[in-house]
Image (cartoon, helix red, strand yellow):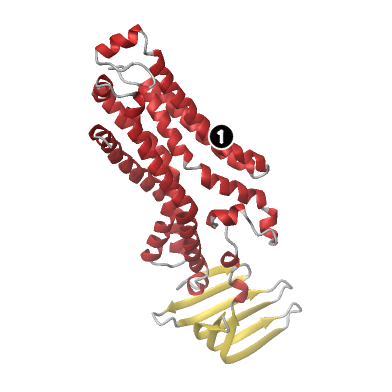
Amino acid sequence: MRLIDRYLLRQLVGPTLWSVVAATALALLSTSLTQLDLIVSGGQNALIFLKATALAMPQLINMVLPVSVFVAALVTLNRLQTDQELVVCFAGGMSRWRVISPAFRLAAVLALASLVINLWVQPTAHRAMREVLFEVRTNLVSSLIREGEFSQPAPGLTVYAQSVDRNGEIRNLFIHRSKDDGGATTYTADTGRLVMKDGAPILRLFRGSTQELSPEGVLNYLTFDDYPFELNTFVRTEERVHFKPSDRFLHELLFPDLTQDWETRNEKKLYAEGNARLATPLYILTFMALAVWAILGGAFSRLGYGRRIAVAGGIAAVTRILGFIAVSAAESNVWINILQYLIPLGGMAWALQAVFRRTRRGFGARGRRLASAGVAP
């Protein structure tokens, strides 16, 4: 790579990295609010919140990469063109492709990084985050018991505890459970402790009583020293055995196990997600091409390129929206998956054709006059 190529590449790398960091931080802020509410309500600490936030970053980075590249390229190329640094490059005999090739090298590297994130990093992080959130939801002490409060962790179940100490001992427990047949059972205990028995969670109640009211209105009263209150009905385990499409690796999306009922019913949705993983990195190249067109797709102007930048931004937005629509439509028709590739490739081809068409038109008498004056045609 020649000196001028390295210089142009350095001018692009810095703003691109800052743009990715800023956009990811904004996206992370909005996403973390949902996780924060779940984790706080589950009684978890800041470490769990930071872990869940870190695991959400790969997907967020992939989401903001095309826009970040577009914004950074616009800012950098506009500055270089306004300061006439690109004009000097053209006047020195550099071709248009030679000038823009560092931008596309950077876009290609980022597209490759995006593909790696899509295929391996994102599903790995999503699976780990699914486990973290599952542990939060199934933390029985935090979900069933809130110190000094009457909580309803499940329909028909009311729980109260005076306190929970550091050793996990629960004091002055009150549990009321309504039954579908109209009956109800109330448990009171001096202390309680959550234990596991044969892989199943049990809340052991010590020195207490039960009051059971039958549907006929008969009250049964019983005292006990040690009573096992089973919690199986309040534990949701489906997330351990079922992963959403965003949690799956590429081979699981494109080659689903059709012996499973869920995979059979959602086969087209899995195909759409798999093709989206492969097509998304193309938008980085497309947005870079649109940014190049916005700055170099017309004559040099000391007044700026606001109009072309606005048009390029509109085209980029429409292109990305069409991509989302194609993903949604592909969930009902497998053949629409081809549009997931044609949309970004078509946008990139149009932008590059517009850039180099401008070059060919500039080779006339006017182009020679501009070149002699040091201005790119």
Q: Is residue 152 above or below residue 29?
A: below
Sort mark 1 into few (<14), some (14-19) or many (20+) by Cα contacts within 10 Å: some
Q: Is residue 166 above or below residue 116?
A: below
Number of numbered discs: 1
- The amino acid marked with disc number 1 is Leu
Residue 94, quarter of the rendered image = top left
- Residue beneath the point at 68% across and 43% down: 332
Q: Residue furthest top?
A: 365
The residue where tag 1 is placed is 342
- Residue beneath the point at 55% across and 45% down: 276
Q: Is residue 27 above or below residue 232?
A: above
Residue 145 x, y percent position in the rendering: 50, 73
Position of 159 compared to 35: left or right?
A: right
| Of the pair 78 and 310, the residue shown nearer to us | 78
- Residue beneath the point at 34% across and 29% down: 100
- Residue beneath the point at 35% across and 32% down: 101
Q: Residue furthest right?
A: 216
Residue 279 x, y percent position in the rendering: 52, 42
Residue 372 x, y percent position in the rendering: 25, 12
Residue 330 x, y percent position in the rendering: 63, 42
| Of the pair 249 and 211, the residue shown nearer to us | 249
Specify the quadrant that holds the N terminus: top left
Residue 308, quarter of the rendered image = top left
Residue 322, quarter of the rendered image = top right
Q: Secondary structure at mark 1?
A: helix
Position of 149 compared to 49: left or right?
A: right
